[in-house]
Amino acid sequence: MFLWFTVFVEIFGSYSPIGYFSEYRYFPFIQDTVFQNNLWWYNLFAISNFAFFTYYFISFLKNKTLRSIAHVSIVLYLFISLGVYIITGSLFSSTSNFVMIIGTLLLLMSVLSFYFELLRSDLLLQLKRLLPFYISVGVLIFNLCVTPVDILSDYFSATHGNALFVKLHITVLLFANLFLYTIFILGFLICSRTRKFSY
């Protein structure tokens, strides 16, 4: 379901480049408004993305106390992230490094807890046919590669003679996305053959 939501986010978020490259023949009402840039849309998506995947991985934990702490952490993260964007007024202009770092750490903790749970169960023997494992690998590597580059991108731009870093940023995003969705597809294909182990 979340993958369909991601498709919707990407389709809706394309309004900004469509408007820009058509010289606002399409979507002329966004020109010279705060919505001209789709950064606000992807900032909100990043928050929901971190919250969803954290929730997804902690749902496999058997320790109720740990699950409760993680649920509280997700709710706090949502409120704090929205609060940061509201207080700083940066929702439409930039990505908050604080929100990205906290989201990545929250996701990292949930994936590591999921791995620890796997080590303590018999599912470790059926790891090849476990869909959440594939998702965890893709999501973890994607975020650990993309988040540092996103944070550094605030300090580099093509207009200030940093075209090399901008190209690096684009390349990292491209390959991270290719890796993420390749792992997802591989996981779905392998686990579709043995649905009983795919959760």
Image: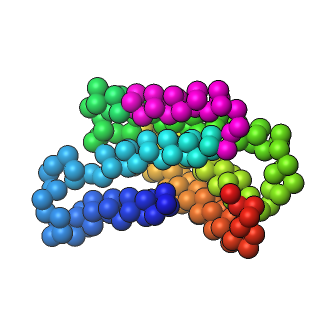
Q: Is residue 129 above or below residue 57?
A: below
Q: How many marks?
A: 0
Q: Please tell me which residue lies in front, 142 or 5.
A: 5
| Colour convention of the picture | rainbow
Residue 52, position as x, y percentages in the image: 51, 46
Tell whether 153 sits left or right of 91: right
Residue 24, position as x, y percentages in the image: 17, 65
Whether residue 10 is visible to the viewer of this picture, yes or no, is no
Q: Is residue 114 above or below residue 20?
A: above
- The image quadrant of residue 87 is top left
Predominant SS along the magenta part: helix
The magenta segment: 60-81
Residue 66 lies within the magenta run: yes
Q: Please tell me which residue lies in front, 127 or 65.
A: 65
- The image quadrant of residue 154 is top left
Position of the C terminus by quadrant: bottom right
Residue 54, position as x, y percentages in the image: 57, 41
Residue 3 lies within the magenta run: no
Tell whether 164 sits left or right of 78: right
**Residue drawn at (49%, 57%) of the image:** 2
Residue 168, position as x, y percentages in the image: 54, 52
Whether residue 76 is visible to the viewer of this picture, yes or no, is yes
**Residue drawn at (71%, 37%) of the image:** 62
